[in-house]
Image: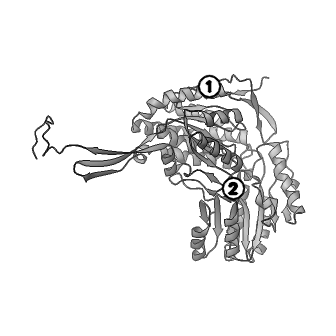
Amino acid sequence: MAMRTIPHFIGGRETPGRSGRRGPVFNPATGEQQAEVDFASAEEVDQAVAIAAAAARAWGASPLGKRADVFFRFRQILVDRKAELADLVSSEHGKVPGDAAGEVARGIENVEFAAGIPHLLKGEYSEGVSTGVDVYSIRQPLGVVAAITPFNFPAMVPLWMISNAIACGNAVVLKPSEKDPSGPVLLARWLEEAGLPAGVLNVVHGDKVAVDRLLEHPDIAAVSFVGSTPVARAIYQRGTAAGKRVQALGGAKNHMVVLPDADMDAAADAAVSAAYGSAGERCMAISVVVAVGDAGDRLVPAIAARLPKVRVGPGTDPKAEMGPLITREHRDKVASYLDLAAREGASVVVDGRKQIIAGNGFFLGVSLIDRVTASMAVYKDEIFGPVLGVVRVASYDDALELVNGNLYGNGTAIFTRDGGAARRFQHDVTCGMVGINVPIPVPVAYFSFGGWKASLFGDTHIYGPDGVKFYTRGKVITSRWPDPATSQIDLGFPQTR
């Protein structure tokens, strides 16, 4: 049988690639290749941008109510067919049903937010700043914007970007991960079914060739990116050097601080769900627990006792709680940290390689490493897998110093019963998102998502109010009109004041 090919989506239709280059798409749960995806040439990217530019002119001038109506209908399609999208995510990414459904649900939140665009684009107005003079502000779309999204959330992160971008009146060229590319094509088809004009959303697949062309194309006004810190930094530098507005979200090393007074059962449950959900392949995963004082003596055994109960399996298993990693190579790299941690002096409490998982999928069991220090690779590197490290410190101040001294500043959490300590932590910690007795503090869609330090390049966070700001330009108008009561000009109507 011929291998199924995943095409681009340009100008309202699925468009086979012409470059002659393709990449494999695997089912991570079986290890088998299930499709090939076309890789775009620079010329194919140019075609998509040209079509988007033509569509952007009419779409940007369309009434706000029309745009909102598209998103109301799109939301209903997503709600009605969420199982179809979740199954597609599971088959190409490997997520178990709960994780895939959760991803779709968080994406729908952003569509709901975008449906409020008539309110979100309201400007400000000051009447009578001087005699006959009023000043007001408006926000206008940028034109054509690019979205470059990661493999770990193939439905949610595209919805983070395209919802606000399109609702604000822009056209989008979306370049999803080549590892799990089918979800964004399905989203594009559904948006057009909801009434989005052809060409407003275009999906081009590919690798560095496509990304480089998007970054240098003169008709791309802005670029949104989510991925690793080295790539985020490069995209930010290249895009801004080309005069583009760029928001580039990078990597993370999220810490969960556990004070001695915390509810240890609640903290252990939170650590397990936050560290191993989606196989640890999420930028908000907890990868380091910071146990303060004697908290580690109680917390580490509590976490270890829970790990044999974590059911690892394919997305076709409705009882599975954790699926495979995205590729065989990534699975092997993540596993290599267990030997490295032991050589560096840490204690491997639970070794996920010892868990027997049937089949040839890219599976790795859950792993727990105790007595990690800040000098170890298992602490410094973004592992992006189901490996949880525990660092023990003597005091709250030591924990704060550890978190603030880390390269990344995406998200963090504290578990405590002490309201004063929690309030101090939320103020003093240098992270963009903070959870108090909440292990993964991903903001709801009407706030914005983003970190600090090496976790974000740019000055706006993604989605929510910052998303509206990023995808529009502000304009201030100062106007003067003659007062009808005093004007000598014939205004064409009676002056009755």
How many neighbours does mark 1 have within 10 angstroms: few (below 14), some (14-19), or many (20 or more)?
A: some
* Left or right of 51 on screen, residue 494: left
* Left or right of 370 on screen, residue 114: left
Residue 126 location (% of width, % of height) = 30, 52
Residue 346 location (% of width, % of height) = 85, 66
Q: Amino acid at mark 1?
A: Glu
Count of labels in the image: 2
Residue lying furthest front in this view? 241
Is residue 207 visible to the viewer in this orientation of the structure? Answer: no
Residue drawn at 44 percent across, 34 percent down: 60
Q: Which residue is mark 1?
A: 14
Q: Amino acid at mark 2?
A: Ala
Q: Which residue is mark 2?
A: 252
Q: Tell me the quarter of the picture where residue 47 sits.
A: top right
Residue drawn at 49 percent across, 51 percent down: 465
Residue drawn at 62 percent across, 53 percent down: 456
Q: Secondary structure at mark 2?
A: loop
Rendered view: 64 above or below 421? above
Q: Tell me the quarter of the picture where residue 4 sits.
A: top right
Rendered view: 358 above or below 199? below
Residue 375 location (% of width, % of height) = 80, 64
Colour scheme of the rendered structure? one colour
Residue 362 location (% of width, % of height) = 81, 44
Residue drawn at 49 percent across, 38 percent down: 142
Q: Secondary structure at mark 1?
A: strand
Disc 1 to disc 2, how far (Cα)? 35 Å
Question: Quick one: label 1 or label 2, which is nearer the N terminus?
Answer: 1
Is residue 457 visible to the viewer in this orientation of the structure? Answer: yes
